[in-house]
Image (spheres, rainbow, N blue to C red):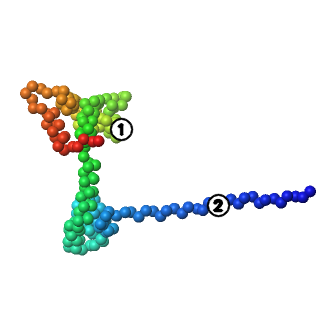
Amino acid sequence: MKKKARKPPPRRRRATPKVPDPPAEPTLPPGLNEAQHAFCLEYLANGFNASAAYKAAYGVDHDPTARTNGHRLLTNADVKAFVARQLEQRWTAAQMSADEALALVASDARADVRVLYDEKGKLLPVQDWPDAIACSVESIEEKPDGSFKVKLTSKLAARRMILEVHRRLKAPGESDTADALAALLARHYKPEP
């Protein structure tokens, strides 16, 4: 009996190790080189001091040079545009919408001081206060006996504001606060989509 020749096992393909892609180069804003971009970021971070920003971005120690060139860079159209865009983004992020303001007023109207105390009647540490009520605390006063008096914002004023905004309250002869508030909101805040 003849022995059959054994076939060698199929060769396994070895996976080619993947070489990780090099980290992406940070993209610079249009029209700015690295030093100008660094100047802009420093200028925004240091409170709008062009001399200090120029020194940090360009490694210059001479004050008159930094002052002159920092001012010159601020007149560059691309630098001005970048700084303006950054400031616009920061301003937009810092604005409070009308809905957010009304939500805070509603939170004031619902604030319950009891959630600031533990089951033994001791005031919780400030860092343990729920966010929903922490914003409604107007003041904290320590009494001579070591206990604390917590004053919340006026629930009555908050509830009145909500009623006025929803046009449910207007005392006879009283100026229409709701109309004034609605006009102010219409002028300064665009409704969110």
In the picture of the structure, the residue carrying the numbered disc 1 is 128
Horizontal side of residue 121 vs 140, given as left or right: right
The numbered dot on residue 14 is: 2
Asked if marks 2 and 1 touch (Cβ < 8 Å), the reply is: no
Q: Position of residue 163 (x, y in %)?
A: 20, 29
Q: Residue at x 27, y 39 (%)?
A: 100
Count of labels shown?
2
Q: Residues within 10 Å of mark 1 (few under 14, many from 20)?
A: few
Q: Quadrant of residue 135?
A: top left
Q: Quadrant of the N terminus?
A: bottom right
The one nearer the camera, 100 or 8, is: 8
Label 2 SS: loop
Note whether residue 145 is visible: no
Amino acid type of the residue that numbered disc 1 sits on in the rendered structure: Asp
Vertical arrangement, residue 103 with respect to residue 44, above or below: above
Q: Residue at x 78, y 59 (%)?
A: 7
Q: Earlier in the sequence, mark 2 or mark 1?
A: 2
Vertical arrangement, residue 57 with respect to residue 171, above or below: below
The one nearer the camera, 98 or 190, is: 190
Q: Position of residue 143 (x, y in %)?
A: 24, 34
Amino acid type of the residue that numbered disc 2 sits on in the rendered structure: Arg
Q: Disc 2 to disc 1, how far (Cα)?
A: 56 Å
Vertical arrangement, residue 132 with respect to residue 78, above or below: above
The numbered dot on residue 192 is: none
Q: Position of residue 148 (x, y in %)?
A: 27, 34
Label 1 SS: helix
Q: Quadrant of residue 34?
A: bottom left
Q: Residue at x 25, y 30 (%)?
A: 109
Q: Position of residue 155 (x, y in %)?
A: 22, 30
Q: Quadrant of residue 32?
A: bottom left
Q: Residue at x 23, y 63 (%)?
A: 80
Foreground tag (2 vs 1):
2
